[in-house]
Amino acid sequence: MNKIIGFLVMVFMFLPWRPIVAIVAAVLFVNINGTELYGWQAGLAHGLFFLPNLVRHLFDGDVLFKATNCTTGYHVAWWIATVGSCIGWLVDATFSFMKASVFVGSDKE
C-alpha cells in the first residue's frame, strides 16, 4: 500500500504542472481565429500547442485546435509539429513515470 501511495504522490509531483503551463500558454499565445488565413509559421505554432488546444476544445467547443482557413504550407507544418509535439509529450510522460517508479522502488522494506 505504501508503494501505491508513494507512486501516486510522485506522479502528482512530476507530471501535472507541465500540462497546466502548456494550457495557460495556449490560452495566452495561440488562440486560433476561424476566419483568419494562416500560413506555415502559424501551422508550426498551432501544431506545437495541439494537445493543450485539444483539451481546451473538449471543454469549450468554440476553441479550435486546427485552423479551418489555411494554406497547404499550414497543413504540412501543422502535421509535422503535431506529430513531434505528441511524441515529445509521450517521451516526457514516460520519463516522468520512470522517475516516479524509481523513487518509489528505492523504498525497500
Image (cartoon, helix red, strand yellow):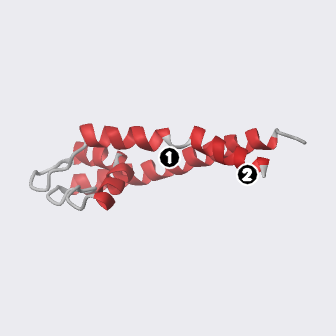
Residue 21 coordinates in the image, percent (x, y):
40, 37
In this rendering, position of residue 104 left or right of residue 23: right
Element at badge 2?
helix
Element at badge 1?
helix
Observer-nearest residue: 17 or 48? 17
Label 1 to label 2: alpha-carbon separation:
27 Å
Residue 1 coordinates in the image, percent (x, y):
78, 52
Residue 27 coordinates in the image, percent (x, y):
27, 42
Observer-nearest residue: 25 or 81? 25
In this rendering, position of residue 34 left or right of residue 98: left
Q: Few, some or many C-alpha atoms within 10 Å of disc 1 (few <14, some 14-19, many ≥20)?
A: few
Q: Nearer the viewer, mark 1 or mark 2?
A: 2
Quadrant in which the C terminus is drawn: top right
Residue 103 coordinates in the image, percent (x, y):
74, 38
**Mark 1 belongs to which amino acid?**
Gly
Per the rendering, the mark at residue 4 is: 2
- Answer above or below: position of 102 versus 50: above
Q: Few, some or many C-alpha atoms within 10 Å of disc 2 (few <14, some 14-19, many ≥20)?
A: few
Residue at far right of view? 109
**Mark 2 belongs to which amino acid?**
Ile
Per the rendering, the mark at residue 88 is: 1
In this rendering, position of residue 81 left or right of residue 72: right
Residue at 14 percent of width and 51 percent of height: 33
Observer able to see residue 64: yes
